[in-house]
Image: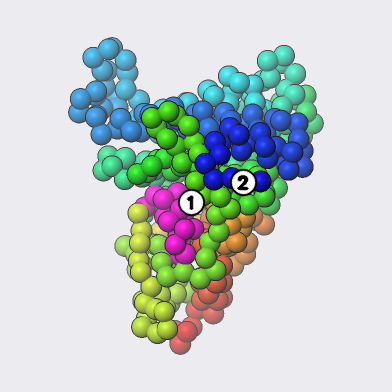
Amino acid sequence: MARKNQTLGEFIIENQSSFKYTSGELSRLINSIRLAAKVVNHEVNKAGLVDIIGAAGETNVQGEDQQKLDVYANDKFIQTLTNRNIVCGIASEEEDDFIIVNSQDENHQNKYVVLMDPLDGSSNIDVNVSVGTIFSVYRRITPVGTPVQIEDFLQKGNEQVAAGYVVYGTSTMLVYTTGDGVNGFTLNPAIGTFYLSHPNMQFPEDGKIYSVNEGNYIHFPQGVKNYIKYCQEEEGDRPYTSRYIGSLVSDFHRNMIKGGIYMYPKSSKNSNGKLRLLYECNPMAFLAEQANGKASDGFMRVMDIEPTELHQRVPFFCGSKNMVEKAEEFMTFPSSEK
Ligand code: AHM
Ligand code: MG
């Protein structure tokens, strides 16, 4: 039972038994993500001091090489998950190929693989705008005791056992699901503890915010253009408000709280949009559905898409259920009368 102000550590222990495979392995995995999130948060918070402590690629006064933050976050999450012997494989937006993790006894006994975007929206760091980490967890499908294979990672989103994100914002939050609703935890930086601040998060069924990079308008398919015009029309509760941070985690987080739709459609420049199915869209889709929202590629449920490659991109429409359904209608019937 979720209680406000519970620490994330307490919450993980108390809710472990509600998870259908209760070996404690998934709890240890979430604990490791919690730890890596705190380490990355500490570094992200120092990003504004770049002129003082040195920029990426430079050597600081202590003689340490300064890493780009996305590389730093990638290394920290991988180190934490491998050093603690928690997973059997990791795939990351920052890595060309998946990583095989050996268990300490070299017998590959761990069951879970993690896929992640270690620092999404990292172009926002230079201007002090929120960024995030996105993660997704699956049970391997190849036999335990053997090295993981590509098919362990190319699973449909509907096979996820957990997913979540960390938003490094005005406050740092860890939001995740293990398939039993979505809960959000806020970091108290003074003592380094996450507290349950947003139990059972839910997308409002309807919303009034649309989030899309309208600079790409001219390149969008007609259905998307028509839907954007629909959002801007004066009728009923429209026009909607436009809000686009350019940081998926932050745009999603705001829309989940206030009600809205996030879109990264395909365009004449990017035939599958920009976002990655495995590292960004599937975990956000799992969270959205667990929070009573919806995620689609414009035509079908994102979590039903059969992945064919690790870094695959897909168009993405995600948020309040009624808004996503409306957008889908426009994709199917892109007539200008709509
Ligand atoms: P990244 O993984 O390279 O950071 O790209 C993903 C980000 C999303 O967070 C954001 O919504 C989108 O790219 C913004 O892209 P654009 O600048 O094309 O609107
Ligand atoms: Mg990304």
Residue 285 in the image: x percent, y percent?
58, 54
Residue farthest toward the right in the current orientation of the protein:
143
Nearest to the observer: residue 142 or residue 12 = 12
Residue visible at 51% across and 71% down?
206
Residue 101 in the image: x percent, y percent?
64, 24
Residue, disc 1: 275
Q: Is residue 172 left or right of residue 9?
A: left
Q: Is mark 1 within 8 Å of ligand 1?
A: yes
Query: Is residue 32 found inside the magenta-colored segment of the image?
Result: no
Residue 315 visible in image:
no
Q: Regarding mark 2 in the picture, which secondary structure is present there?
A: loop
Q: Quadrant of residue 116?
A: top right
Residue farthest toward the bottom in the current orientation of the protein:
337
Residue, disc 2: 2
- Highlighted magenta segment, given as a residue range: 246-268
Q: Amino acid at mark 1?
A: Leu
Q: CA distance from mark 2 to mark 1?
A: 32 Å
